[in-house]
Image (spheres, coloured by chain):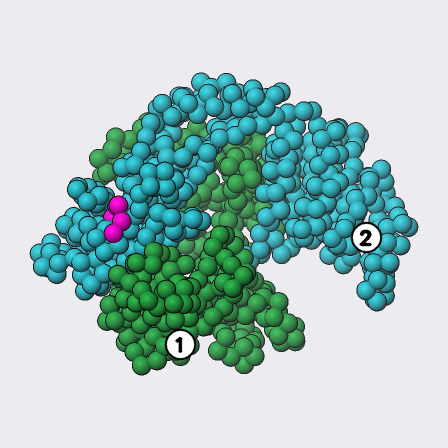
Chain colours: A green, B cyan
Amino acid sequence: MNAEIIAIGSELLTPFRQDTNSLFLTEQLNRLGVEVSFKTIVGDRRPDLINVARIALSRADVVIFMGGLGPTEDDLTRECVAETLGRPLKRHARIVEDLRARFAARGWKMAENNERQGDVIDGADALDNKRGSAPGQFLHIDDQYGHAIIVLLPGPPHELRGMFEEHVFERLKRLVPAQHIATRELKIGMIGESMVDKRAAPIYKAAQGVETTILAGTPGEVQLHLRAQASSFEEAQKRVDALATLLEDEFEDAIFATKGESMEQIVGYYLGMREKTLAVAESCTGGMLAARITSVPGSSRYFLGGAVVYENSVKTALAGVPPLLIAEHGAVSSQVAAALAEGIRNSCKSSFGIGITGVAGPAGGSDEKPVGLVFHALADGSHTEVIERTFPGDRDRIRHWATQQALDMVRRKLM
Amino acid sequence: MNAEIIAIGSELLTPFRQDTNSLFLTEQLNRLGVEVSFKTIVGDRRPDLINVARIALSRADVVIFMGGLGPTEDDLTRECVAETLGRPLKRHARIVEDLRARFAARGWKMAENNERQGDVIDGADALDNKRGSAPGQFLHIDDQYGHAIIVLLPGPPHELRGMFEEHVFERLKRLVPAQHIATRELKIGMIGESMVDKRAAPIYKAAQGVETTILAGTPGEVQLHLRAQASSFEEAQKRVDALATLLEDEFEDAIFATKGESMEQIVGYYLGMREKTLAVAESCTGGMLAARITSVPGSSRYFLGGAVVYENSVKTALAGVPPLLIAEHGAVSSQVAAALAEGIRNSCKSSFGIGITGVAGPAGGSDEKPVGLVFHALADGSHTEVIERTFPGDRDRIRHWATQQALDMVRRKLM
């Protein structure tokens, strides 16, 4: 079976916005054995939307529409799909009541235009939206367009993902011929993409029946996606696992995740397992490291806190760095990184302390200390390790590289 | 005039890769006054490619194909466009010679399949590719598809950009009626999308000749994109500015940006202008607020630092919150938020201090203090303001909402 994914919204036809939902949907559809043959992006114009809907129904078995389900006059997806199919829209009183209750719970009166969100194409299931107001729709037709599955999903990524996982995946699974697909996602830290490819390619090219994709993730992370399709799940799993083992032998401890986990999840996992705690003092990363660590639910079990130490006096006030040390070596130095790690460990009474100081740019670089230079320190109470790196890229990439390097130091310490 | 952009390549239909060239092309086409009406992504399959080419020629004045111009058997764009148009391909001896010379210069012998790159659609101009091997093509037709401009470009972004700027922009400019486009982007803080639409719609609908798109940004941000097209740039600018003024009258100080700036840029701009400094103490946002503030280059001029205070003892150690206050009111309380703001302001000696404490979830909520409850405090030395909000969504969205609310408090204070 094949699918077409249609992203709707005039903003997606500007230079500023891009559909990213289709990547998630493609992954989910592939898991079910459905290939994506076309992706289309169209604006909020009635004739264009109807044109696109008609074409998709003529060439795909599964057609997924994303966006245009909100309450505004620009939100035309319901009407246009209904018109294309020659089916009426019916307003569901229960959905309208739920919307009204949702507004009332926040002490707001619902604007009348919101009622349009209760319009459901005749014959479709309305899909409950826990994360937003617009319900989705699921419709299985067998008419002038032949056999087709039509899904309408909201555009905001968190609403779309939640709704797909809760309501669409199982419905599709019942309608799609059984396929068995196994996947693995290995993540490699702090090695460049071309170097990973050079070492991995001879291995994955020799593997039978496993599709491999190499992908640069955020800075300091390269992903190897393995995918096998077979007549039984066990066979598919065996194939991806065999290749994963060969790749693990090649990259050894540079592989930090074998099932797609993030670096901050892995570090949290090790800290929890070893019953250790962590505190951080960041200068150039400005809170990004703490934000990554605390993005993991439950991180309060092992993360005690930290300091963002932009101003030199704050390095002293919050992380106890002696002013003379800064005066002697400069704020961006191996010595200050070590003092930050040790100082924050003392202030927070944690097992480990991390210190980061560097030049994120675009300004502030010099011949001696160029943009991209970062010192990362890890203190455990008896020993403090410092790693100096010079990272490429812009401010955002340099900051991301630095947080990855610091997390990788904790991971290697605990492995 | 309208355009369709077609990205060709089976890798663009996997979960791992995305077309980004179309953002560049859209910007360039918009500059010429050409609207993009459709974007299509299709794999390396002959019937699919012909299907897509035929549809695009039926609905767009300018059709740009990207990718599929290389030497391999997967590279089908030339053949399929020629077949769609019913025109023959002609092999250009000069291009083949150039390719051969290119290979020879590197000491390689050219594989025969490379000669296909010299095939040019009858009537098209071949476009020289300085950065790679595959030439592009430019064709202006007036036949069964009516008047149309067809452009074939290579897929690698640096080849595509260079070729567009050197060979395509001027050719299009000569063929496209002169148009001038002006845009504005207003951003509104801490008001829901449907409420913004309800208040904005009567205004932008009454405006002549300005297209308006409403878009939900990150939590706590709604964007209004205005766009006008006119025969002179001044006229286009006058129209978007007039509408922007009416919208500014309606939303007053809820509008935080009028030229697309981010909330953290605006807050930084005000702090710099008023020569004030800021420090933050974050619990549930875990460094995300500091990371947003420090994502702005030059933020070290007004941001001194902050504390991430997960563990209660760290609230005391880094932000001077009295342990008794936490014992009495709980860590998530108005009192602790205020103490964090005042404490971090004292520790960092800044003009303003922000304190945030709340329940980001998914665990840790109670009937009295549910997931999503956040207290935001702003201290200026003489007065401390606290705002209590209960935000919807998952951990990531709640954390984002809270940072937006805190930044908005600083903005309103400084306005």
Residue located at (28% from left, 45% from top): B406
Q: Distance between the residues labelled 1 and 2?
A: 55 Å
Residue displayed at 66% across by 28% down: B1
Q: In this view, does B354 lie above or below B411?
A: below
Q: Mark yes or no: residue A294 visible.
A: no
Q: Which residue is drawn at 39% across and 40% down?
A: B269
Side (left or right) of B362 relative to B260: left
Is residue B352 inside the magenta stretch?
yes
Does A219 sit left or right of B352 as displayed? right
Residue depicted at x 21% and y 57%: B319
**Residue position marked by numbered label 1 in the rendering:** A385
Amino acid on which the number 1 mark rests in the picture: Glu
Specify the amino acid type for callout 2.
Gln
Magenta residue span: B349-356
Secondary-structure class at tag 2: helix
What residue would you read off at disc 2?
A: B117
Q: Which chain carries label 2?
A: B
Q: Which of B1 and B240 is in front in this view?
A: B240
Answer left or right for B284 relative to B26.
left
Helix, strand or loop for the magenta stretch, by majority: strand
